[in-house]
């Protein structure tokens, strides 16, 4: 049995790894907030930057991760299926809870989406890479087209059931998926792989360079979008939604994967960040388009993002100590 000095060194090592995974992301987000405060990043710049990020840079990054992945032949259907089923279960549970708590259906829909939909790519991908390296980025990339689709479908169904009289329009959901730029990046990458397309080195290098700016730029934009002044209006329900997202629902969805599914470490890390990352910024814009309580959705993004730097550190440290990662 190891002595106390060895245990202490191991604990400190795990704490350092956990800190190094979370701290850079936190610092970049805070830098974005600082730039906005100093008016280096204006409201107009943030709006244009957000559109540029989701319509151009993110699809290139996803194309890079999928097309240039070293090994995607051994696709784990159980891994993908678990993620999709867990997201569906998450929407079902959060929707039932929200319907019982809030008489206001607009807020109920925003609560259910905020509790389930995560900022998987913007926050989860750089943390997963920092924690486990590029192989983990590949596991995240494998999940991306499926989880992006499930989040979009789940949000559309939740908004329809909770505030639109239960009318789910399949055509509207399909149009939403067809207009999702990230899915386009995945589709092109898969098509190129199936056709055995070989890109010249200069093009590979250019794509890789564009992909490399996606994470820091996305985190800066995220920080500049956070409005701390909005937190006072609905603090307690926003806090309940944020903690439900970061602790309760995430733990409920992740635990079976650890105990019974026999996934490898890279797959577990990808699932961990799928569930434990804060509310998605695009959920705020979805709430606006759907006529839901978008102010509530925005406040959930702000508070869950700030709280996640503490909850992610504690969760990563606990899982490192338990030997899961």
Image: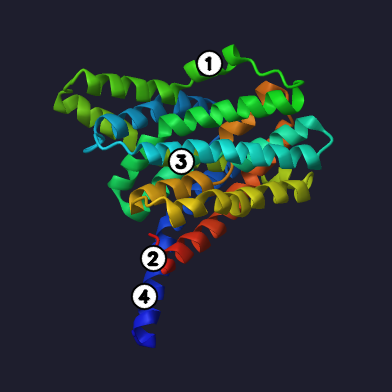
Nearer-the-camera pick, 60 or 89: 89
Q: Position of residue 118 (x, y in %)?
A: 54, 40
On the picture, is 289 further left or further right than 139? right
Could you classify mark 4 by the number of other residues whose Cα lies within 10 Å: few (under 14), some (14-19), or many (20 or more)?
some
Q: What is the CA distance from the residue labelled 4 to the residue labelled 3?
A: 32 Å
Q: Position of residue 24 (x, y in %)?
A: 43, 54
Could you classify mark 2 by the number of other residues whose Cα lies within 10 Å: few (under 14), some (14-19), or many (20 or more)?
few
Q: What is the CA distance from the residue labelled 1 to the residue labelled 2?
A: 41 Å
Which circle, 4 or 3, is nearer the viewer? 3
Nearer-the-camera pick, 131 or 216: 131
Helix, strand or loop at disc 2?
Answer: loop
Residue designated by label 3: 82
Residue lying at 75% horizontally and 35% vertically, measured from the top left: 108
Q: Earlier in the sequence, mark 2 or mark 3?
A: 3
Residue designated by label 2: 323
Helix, strand or loop at disc 4?
Answer: helix
Q: Height in image: 315 above or below 277? A: below
Q: Which mark is residue 10?
A: 4
Q: Position of residue 115 (x, y in %)?
A: 64, 42
Q: Earlier in the sequence, mark 2 or mark 4?
A: 4
Q: Height in image: 242 above or below 80? A: below
Instruction: Check the image and name the residue furthest to the top.
Output: 171
Q: What is the CA distance from the residue labelled 2 to the residue labelled 3?
A: 21 Å
Labels 1 and 3 touching (C-beta < 8 A): no
Helix, strand or loop at disc 1?
Answer: helix
Helix, strand or loop at disc 3?
Answer: helix
Residue designated by label 1: 174
């Amino acid at each position: 049995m190891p002595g106390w000095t060895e245990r202490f060194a191991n604990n400190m090592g795990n704490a350092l790894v956990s800190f190094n995974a979370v701290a850079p992301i936190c610092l970049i987000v805070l830098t974005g907030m600082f730039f906005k405060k100093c008016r280096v990043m204006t409201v107009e710049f943030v709006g244009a930057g957000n559109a540029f990020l989701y319509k151009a840079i993110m699809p290139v990054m996803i194309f890079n991760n999928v097309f240039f992945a070293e090994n995607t032949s051994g696709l784990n259907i159980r891994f993908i299926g678990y993620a999709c089923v867990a997201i569906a279960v998450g929407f079902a549970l959060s929707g039932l809870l929200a319907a019982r708590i809030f008489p206001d259906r607009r807020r109920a829909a925003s609560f259910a989406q905020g509790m389930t939909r995560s900022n998987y790519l913007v926050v989860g991908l750089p943390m997963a890479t920092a924690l486990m390296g590029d192989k983990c980025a590949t596991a995240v990339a494998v999940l991306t087209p499926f989880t992006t689709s499930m989040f979009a479908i789940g949000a559309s169904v939740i908004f329809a059931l909770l505030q639109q009289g239960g009318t789910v329009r399949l055509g509207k959901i399909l149009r939403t998926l067809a207009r999702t730029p990230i899915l386009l990046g995945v589709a092109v990458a898969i098509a190129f792989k199936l056709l055995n397309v070989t890109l010249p080195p200069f093009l590979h290098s250019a794509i890789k360079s564009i992909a490399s700016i996606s994470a820091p730029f996305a985190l800066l934009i995220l920080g500049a979008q956070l409005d701390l002044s909005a937190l006072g209006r609905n603090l307690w329900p926003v806090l309940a939604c944020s903690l439900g997202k970061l602790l309760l629902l995430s733990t409920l969805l992740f635990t079976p994967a650890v105990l019974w599914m026999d996934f490898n470490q890279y797959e577990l890390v990808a699932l961990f960040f799928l569930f434990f990352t804060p509310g998605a910024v695009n959920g705020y814009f979805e709430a606006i388009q759907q006529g839901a309580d978008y102010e509530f959705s925005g406040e959930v993004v702000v508070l869950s993002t700030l709280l996640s730097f503490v909850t992610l550190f504690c969760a990563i440290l606990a899982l490192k100590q338990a030997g899961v990662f």
